[in-house]
Image (spheres, grey):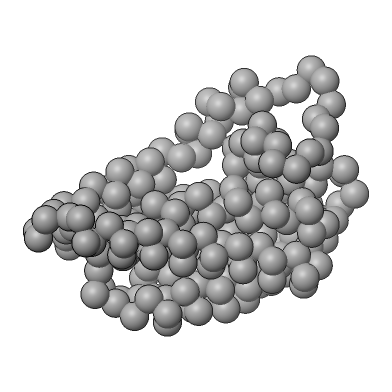
Amino acid sequence: MSIFILVISLILDSFVTSIAYGSDNIKIPNSSIILINFISALMLTLAILFGISLMNFIPEGLPNKISFIIFFSLGLYKLFEVLIKKYFKKFSLHKKPLTFKAFDMKFALNVYIDEKSADFDKSKAISLKESVYLSLALSLDSLAVGIGISFMQINYVLLIVLCFILGVLSFKFGILLGKKLVSKREINLSWLSGLILLLISFTKL
């Protein structure tokens, strides 16, 4: 399985999010972009290491089945992610202002539902603190995919490095592209990521 296909499936969400920020003229400093992608790469690394550690306890032949279930389930979710997020947005409207606290899971969940809510102080700029929550929201997929990847015979180091480098580049390009877009229409490519993951899952059968 091509590493580049896996990388594309992992960075698509970040790319689309960066377009949204660019179109809204929300600034994301280079330091925040690097931190976002570093945390995403770190989450992917931890997930892969966790999956590798499980190999000692899993019977032969079972890893492929687990990998199929992970990729298929996540791919199916990504196909309908936009509808699921719209449903949860109905329940995420706050009657009181949010308070920004460390490890605020409620705030993190809202960022996952609507990535642009990471601009908590409405400053039109993403600080390092805000970028942590944004990166956690964007790297949730990496946790599941990382475990699935750990059962595959690929170059893990190359995959992680490419995810970081291409993640940074796609984020910067997405912001520039967003600034050029006149239309404020929301762009959704999660279905494409879902389709890629579904195709990967069937290679594990």
Residue in view at x 71 percent, y 23 percent: 93
Q: Is residue 158 visible?
A: yes
Relative depth, front residue between 133 and 197? 133
Does residue 201 appear in the picture of this structure?
no
Horizontal side of residue 90 vs 132, given as left or right: left
Residue visible at 62% across and 68% down in the picture: 38
In this rendering, the answer to whether 148 lies above or below 87 is below
Location of residue 115 with respect to 160 vertically, above or below: above
Residue that protrudes farthest toward the front in the picture = 56
| Residue 55 pos. (x, y %) | 23, 61
**Which corner quadrant of the image does residue 95 belong to?**
top right
- Considering the image in quadrants, where does the C terminus appear? bottom left
Q: Is residue 51 left or right of residue 131?
A: left
Residue 2, percent from left and from top: 30, 76
Residue 140: image location, x then y, percent: 50, 50
182 on left or right of 187: right
In the rendered view, tell whether residue 13 sits above or below residue 153. Answer: above
Toward which corner of the image does residue 62 lie, by quadrant?
bottom left
Residue at the extreme top: 95
Q: Is residue 100 above or below residue 63?
A: above
- Along the line of sight, which residue is nearer the eye, 190 or 108? 108
**Quadrant of the rendering where the N terminus is positioned:** bottom left
Q: Position of residue 203 (x, y in %)?
A: 17, 62
Total number of numbered discs in the rendering: 0
In the displayed structure image, the side of residue 129 where residue 47 appears, left or right: left
Residue at position x 77%, y 51% in the image: 130
Give the residue displayed 47% in from the left and 74% down from the top: 160
